Amino acid sequence: MLVVGLGNPGARYSGSPHNVGFCVLDRLAEHLSGGALGSRAAASPAAPDWSDRFRAQLLLARVDSEELVLLKPLTFMNRSGQSVREAMSFFEIPVQSTLVVHDEIDLPFGSVKLKRGGGEAGHRGLESVSEEVGSRDYLRVRVGVGKPANGVVADFLLEPLSATQQAELGGALEAARDAALAVARHGIDRAMNQINRPALSGAVERKGDGPETGRPE
């Protein structure tokens, strides 16, 4: 299975809502680093051994008997699909076994949902993936970042979160990591039944090149 985290490279965007895909992949890699395949074992659980391939950061890992390819495209958001297509082709991974982790402004801040296929809702990273792989049928982990009360969505998504917001989002990043693991272990249908349940009152819901106007890259 290919697991893709969408984001923009560079310190300028590292703490922004648009980079939650990268953050989830980092947490997933740390969780799985003891089982890394195809490269030197990570020095510690906090230091996965990413390599540079397909214009992306790549890590091979395993969940139970399932081999995972973790991918963080470094092409900037609106060209993410190039890396995804190259990795899918090289590893012969079908679109139905490709899981994309991304920010979602149409979900409440801190919520997480799984989805199979669907549209892109203006998300430039998803649009690039759909165009490059020729299908919308890939799986998604959607991490809710909410919408700005005022101002341009692009500015909101590309500006760093406050320390308080980053702390609040931590639980959602772990929930998204666990959602990806559930898909790898149990398949999308069982994982959706588990992750997409309504949250209890007061609980976090656990459940797809540069700045621009409107939806940012």
Image (cartoon, rainbow, N blue to C red):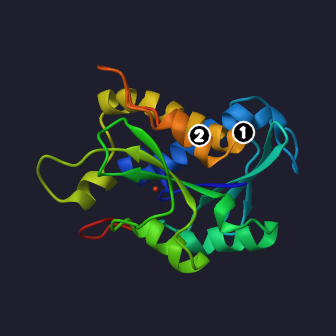
Q: Residue at x 58, y 63 (%)?
A: 138
In the image, taking residue 114 as reference, residue 147 lies left or right, namely left
Label of residue 185 in the image: 1
Residue 76 shown left or right of residue 17 in the figure: right
Q: Quadrant of the N terminus?
A: bottom right
Q: Does the image show residue 60?
A: yes
Instruction: Pinpoint residue 40: horizontal percent, then vertical percent.
Output: 88, 44
Q: Is residue 70 left or right of residue 156?
A: right
Residue name at image x 52 percent, y 54 percent: 140
Q: Secondary structure at mark 1?
A: helix
In the foreground, 72 or 10: 72
Identity of the residue drawn at 57% across and 38% down: 179
Query: What separation in Å lies between label 2 and label 1 (alpha carbons)?
Result: 8 Å
Say if 202 sits above or below 127 in the image. above
Three-letter residue code for mark 2: Ala
For the view shown, which residue lies furthest in the left direction?
A: 150
Q: Which residue is mark 2?
A: 191
Answer yes or no: is residue 79 visible. Answer: no
Residue 85, placed above or below residue 148: below
Q: Secondary structure at mark 2?
A: helix
